[in-house]
Structures are given as C-alpha cells and as structure tokens.
Image: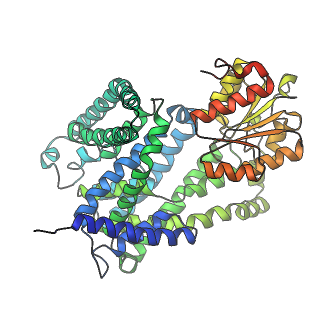
Amino acid sequence: MDHNLSLITTIAAAFGVALIFGFIAERIKVPALVGYLVAGILIGPATPGFVADVHIASQLSEIGIMLLMFGVGLHFAPDDLLAVKRVAVPGAVVQMGVTTLLGMGVAWWWGWSLGGGLILGLSLACASTVVLPPLAGVLGGPVASAASAKPLWITIGQTLLQVSAFIALMLIVGRRALPWLLWQVARTGSRELFTLAVIATAIGIAYGASAIFSVSFALGAFFAGSVMRESEFSHRAAQESLPLRDAFSVLFFVSVGMTVDPAILMTQPLRALAVVAIIVFSNFAASLALVLALRYPLNTALTVAASLGQIGEFSIILAGLGLSLGLLPSEGMSLVLAGVLISIGLNSFLLAAVAPLQRWILKHSGFARNLERRDVPSAELPMSTERKYLEGQVVLVGYGRVGRRIAKALDARAIPYVVVEQNREMVEELRSKGGVAVSGNAAEPAVLIQAHIADAAMLVIASPDTLDVRQMAETARALNPNIEVIVRTHNEEESVLLQKEGIGLVFFGEAELARGMASHVLKRFAPAAGSPEAQGH
C-alpha cells in the first residue's frame, strides 16, 4: 500500500511550526503573521532540514486567499466608503500612483521587465489583483501566449468586459440568490449545513469567477462576501466561517514564506533597503501631504501617514499572483516579503514617534503651527444649535452601521442626540440633513466638551474601535459624574472585562447589539419606547 502522506505532513508541519513562531511573535509585540511567514521560510526549500511539499502548500494557500477575501467582503460597507470618498479616492490615487511609479522605477533600474516592475510597484502600494490574470501575457508573462499577440486595447477591453459581466451578475443575481439560499439553509436548523453553505459559496464563486470570467480568486471571493453581506445572516456567516478562514489564512502565509529565499537580505541588501524605503517613506510622504492638503490637523496627518507606512497580506497576495503568472521574478517575491516583515517591525516605532515628531515640528516651524491652529468648522457646534441638543441629550459616538441604527431609533421617538464622529465628511453630510454633529476623536476632552457632555443624560459609544473606550468613559464622568455610559464591544470576553472595570452597560455583536442598545436608550428616555416599532423592527 502506498502511504504517501505529503498532504498531511505538510499541513501538520505548517500548523505546528506556525503555532510556535506565531506565539513568539505575539510575545514580542509583533503581528502573528510575521511568525507564520518565518515558519514558512523554515520549512521551505531555502533552509536546511525538513522541506514541506511546496506544490500542496501553494494550493492550500489559494483556499486561504479565497476565505480571507470573502471575510473582507462580509465586512465591506459601500456606504462607509462613499462617506469618505472625498478623502479615499484622491488619497488612493496619489498614494498608490506615487508608490507604484517608484517601484517601477527601481525595477527598471535593476533591469526587470515591465510586468515585473508593475507588480513590484503595485505590491508596495497595496493595490488590486483584479485584472492581472488576463493581462499577464501582455505584460510579459509566459502564460496566455495567444493573448500577447492581440493588440493591447483588445486585451484591456476584453478584461473590462469580463470583470463588468461578473460584477453585474453578482449585483443582479447574486444579491437576490445568495441571501435566499442562506435563509433556506438556516431554516433547516443545521449549524453544520449552514457553515457548509457559507464555505461552498465562497470557494465556488471564487473558482467560477476565475474559470468563467478570467478574474482572480480574490475578486470572486470578495464579491461573494460583499453580496452575502446583504443577508440578515451575514453576521452569523462571518462567525461560522471564521475558524476555517483563520486556519487557511495561516497556511497561506506559511506557503508564501516557503517561496522566499531569506538570503536576499545578504546578497541584495541595497535592493531590500530600496524596497523598505519606498514602503515607509513614499507612503508616509504622499499620505502626509494629501491629508494636510485636505485641511486636517497636523496630528491627524502624521498619524495617518505613519499608519500607512507598512504593507501586509494584500501585498503578499498580489505578489504571489504575479509570481504564479510568471510576471514577478522569485527575487521580487523575496523582496516584497522582506518589505512586509521589516515595515511591520518598523511601524510601531513610527507610530510611537508621531507625538515627539509633532512637538519638534511645532517648535521649529511657524508654518506647522498655523496648520495645527487651522479652524475646522465641523469640530464645533453652530451657535444656532437648539437648546434641546445641549441639555439632557444623548451623545452618540460613532455613526457606522450600529450608530446609524441607534440614531434611526432615536429619531423615531424624537429623542435629541449629538453625533461625535471622526469622519469630517460624514459630519458635514449629517449637518446638511439637519442633524447635530461634531467631528473629532471622542477620547479627547475638547471634543466631548463640544458635544456638551457636561449636561448630557447619556453617552452611547457605538464606534467599532474600542481602544479609546476607557478614556471616553473617564472623560465623560469627569465632566458629568451622573452620566450613564453605554458601550459596544466585539466579543464576550471584552464585554465582561469592561463591565468589571465599571465602564458602563456593555453590548456586543452587531445587529443584535444595535437593537439592544437602541432599546435600552429608548426605555431610559421614554418607558413606552420598548415597542417593536421603537426598536426599528
């Protein structure tokens, strides 16, 4: 009997070594994915000792890509993107354009092909994988030799038609069919069948998108998730698929590590340094200039710029696709991975340097001091604000999906509230519709003061970012000792911890959270408000 267990051996080695180095990475305060990549290097062909099956690992990693992008799609909110379009669109064009051109420039200097330079530049800019497969032949890859004989405009036109057809099919058919399918499966009451339906949908649509429309697995899986998000079971779908998604994501990072030659840092140190410099300084400079040009304060600009001075899993996905299509040389994959590891390691130092760098700049530059003092109208309530919004009101922090549901319930009962939201464009849009809102980080006392927290009856923290919850609650109680605090969180453990600390009443989840928070607020202000109508059902 043939006992060829290369699949089991590869999975066992990948998970075991990834567990060890992921744990070490977390203990030294770096993301676990760094440990997974190192694990892949150790069991790959570039290092001595045990070598896992690279071919099997590569196929497993494709499933990891599908599930990873499916999860991204499940959490993608077009409304949230449209709310920041004035920042996101020019920001993406400027930051990606500058970084891509710099990457292409150094690749040209090294003698790489046009396709290799483009993939390197896009990887360093964290760009899309959508059109690479059909354009591989045109860009110089060995695949699709017939495509390279076609005029460029025909290839691009076909690509756009294929992508458009797939998107149209998902938006017209998928938006109706997938929620209906989940509903039918959920009615059976079988948890296993529901999980199977979610995974089969993600992988099936990703494969079909690639086989029929010649687009990447990543795009197909992303649209499967974004369309499934229309279902009322989207939150459950995300929870049910999370364990499998995490497991295969680990295999993806390990398989990437297996393709990398760590000797690149010794043999080509200047090239590795150039890649890191483009990632850190190009992204930092472009983002800083853009945020300042959009009239945000210096502190905000520095924080955003420092946060974007790194690349991660999406760059790895793109570089891996370029490698599989024969566009990116193996050296390029090693350089991109070196850039991921080093930029992630440097990013915590960049973020820590924001405050001292801001103080130094403000001390030595009058122009910077003028930038910091710039008047931001949305950071203050207008003088014409009615008194009912200044006394006994609800201060609602965060106007995302949960915040909007709570606001809708408050509007239905005519309960006055003030929204505190960091997204300035969203605040301006709210004000244009007659809402009362201020822009800024509610963890800063000045922002809560502008929302008149001292005379408010309740603080509702519906923001998805819970890092500043404690600071918000402490500031609110310092200014208003009798205020009631309601908080959202993401898991039961965090909920229990916050309640033990006396932060306030804590809810977790999403749809259930919004209904629960809204119901509590309504009952607090109007005892009769607990009806289904008041809860937005």
Q: Residue 474: where, in percent of width, then height?
A: 82, 49
Q: How is the image coloured?
A: rainbow
The residue lying at 65 percent from left, 17 percent from top is 533
Q: Is residue 177 visible?
A: yes
Q: Residue 506: where, in percent of width, then height?
A: 70, 42
Left or right of 331: which side holds 304?
right
Report the quarter where the N terminus lies.
bottom left
Q: Is residue 121 visible?
A: no
Report the quarter where the C terminus lies.
top right
Residue 336 in which image quadrant? bottom left
In this picture, is 524 found above or below 22? above
Q: Residue 92: where, in percent of width, then height?
A: 49, 44
Left or right of 508: which side holds 186?
left
In this picture, is 108 found above or below 74? below
In this picture, is 84 found above or below 27? above
Which of 14/428 is in front?
Answer: 14
Q: Residue 175: where, in percent of width, then height?
A: 38, 26
In this picture, is 408 found above or below 72? above
The residue lying at 21 percent from left, 55 percent from top is 141
Q: Residue furthest front?
A: 189
Numbered label tally: 0
Residue 295 in which image quadrant? top right
Left or right of 420: which side holds 323?
left
Which of 88/490 is in front?
Answer: 490
The residue lying at 64 percent from left, 61 percent from top is 351
The residue lying at 74 percent from left, 54 percent from top is 368
Residue 354 in which image quadrant? bottom right
Which of 536/172 is in front?
Answer: 536
